[in-house]
Image (spheres, rainbow, N blue to C red):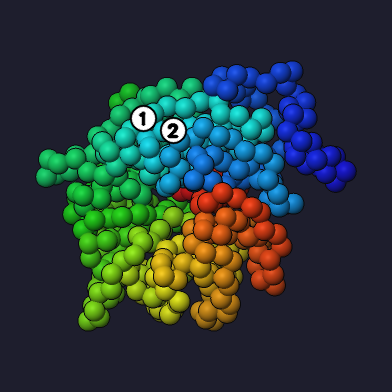
Amino acid sequence: MIQRRHWLRAAAGGAALLGLAGCASAPSPLSAPSWAAPSAGTGDLGVVVERASGRLAIVNTSEPRVLGRVDGLGDLSHASVVFSRDAASAFVFGRDGALSRVDLLQMKLTGRVMQAGNSIGGAISQDGRLVAAQNYQPGGIKVFDARTLAAVADIPAVGADGKPSRVVGLADLPGSRFIYALFDAGEIWIADLSEPKAPRLTKFRDVGRQPYDALVTPNGRHYIAGLFGEDGLSLIDLWDDAPRARRILAGYGRGEAPLPVFKMPHLRGWAVAGRHAYLPAIGRHEVLVVDTETWAEVDRIAVAGQPVFVMARPDGRQVWVNFAVPDYQRVQVIDTPSRRVVRTLEPGAAVLHLEFTPRGEAVWISSRDANRVSVVDTASFQTLAQLPMEAPSGIFFTSRAGRVGL
């Protein structure tokens, strides 16, 4: 414990961290990292996107505080982050099409490529060797060597109609594979990059209108894509000998007047607790509860607004929900055994993201317009800390490095 606290104090100081990592001198900002196992651990670390300033705040999650910041990351208005296998590097996907690599221990930018005109996320392969970016413009995915950021594959997304499509819902699968949805074409593709120079594609046609985001269940078995153009979702059982896409929850809003959608819901975040999945209903003030054995709807939970993120605490006992405007100052907590909302919190204007600590004793909540991140105890619901941030959005902890589909 004494050594750990010593490291934390050194990290806050910045330069002393280099000595703990065993480095004689700092590398140039764009030099490749050593990729050797760091002598200081990374399990306590995470990043918060400060979207207005184009930078990452590197944070400690066990003793909540900001350790340092990394600038020069471009347009982070819809940024997402994945981590290397050793959790020492963060790969940042910027809205401007940039892919950046940040060394968390040295708090340095160690690589950056402009790979597209408009990008909204990415994934890292099971073995940590490949990083893939999903793109709106020009569409398709591009795949890079994680160590060098050299391009290894460029896979256009052209649907059966012959038109290019925006790509969403990109996730990693076992065996150097990536799965993703073609929003405009209504298709889902799997790209097998076992041989990166010769990718093998499996295409699922007619999966539903406008798949907008997707998740992979924690065991890697099911890929679920939400459908913006119709009520329902598309499901693929990846363990089937001959996988196919099938509709689930078709017509969950049938007979009810459609509501305007103020913000697209996000499915990424593992809203699976026990044998049930908790999913945001498009445009409705409801969370859908789905049995993952039958994939039938078993309940609906009324909530305060249109849900955006519906995220399960790691143990599955709670599900936390944030909302689109005009209710985006609120967060609600669902108790999964009773399926009741048990607490409503207002941590600050414009809640954009939530991230649980690895074992779920606390949740970090970004409030963009309040310029802060709140750290909340998930048992007592008391605020443990408030960290000043400049327009914070996405929060990502290194515990994601060992999880499928994140």
The amino acid on which the numbered mark 2 sits, given as a three-letter code, is Leu
Q: Are marks 2 and 1 in contact (CB under 8 Å)?
A: yes
The amino acid on which the numbered mark 1 sits, given as a three-letter code, is Gln
Which residue is the extreme one toward the right? 2
Residue 119, by quadrant, is top left
Q: Earlier in the sequence, mark 2 or mark 1?
A: 2
**What x and y, as percent, mark residue 197?**
33, 23
Q: Answer left or right for 373 relative to 177.
A: right
Position of residue 340 relative to residue 288, above or below, is below
Disc number at residue 138?
none
At 75% from the left and 24% from the top, the residue drawn is 22
Secondary structure type for disc 1: loop
Disc number at residue 99?
2
Position of residue 333 relative to residue 189, above or below, is below
Q: Answer left or right for 71 relative to 45.
A: left
Which residue has dot 1 on it? 115
Q: Nearer the viewer, residue 112 or 241?
A: 112
Q: From mark 2 to mark 1, how far is it between C-alphas?
A: 7 Å
For label 1, count other residues whose C-alpha is less than 10 Å away and answer few (under 14), some (14-19) or many (20+): many
At 58% from the left and 72% from the top, the residue drawn is 345
Q: Nearer the viewer, residue 139 or 237?
A: 139
For label 2, count other residues whose C-alpha is less than 10 Å away and answer few (under 14), some (14-19) or many (20+): many
**What x and y, as percent, mark residue 201?**
27, 37
At 53% from the left and 51% from the top, the residue drawn is 391
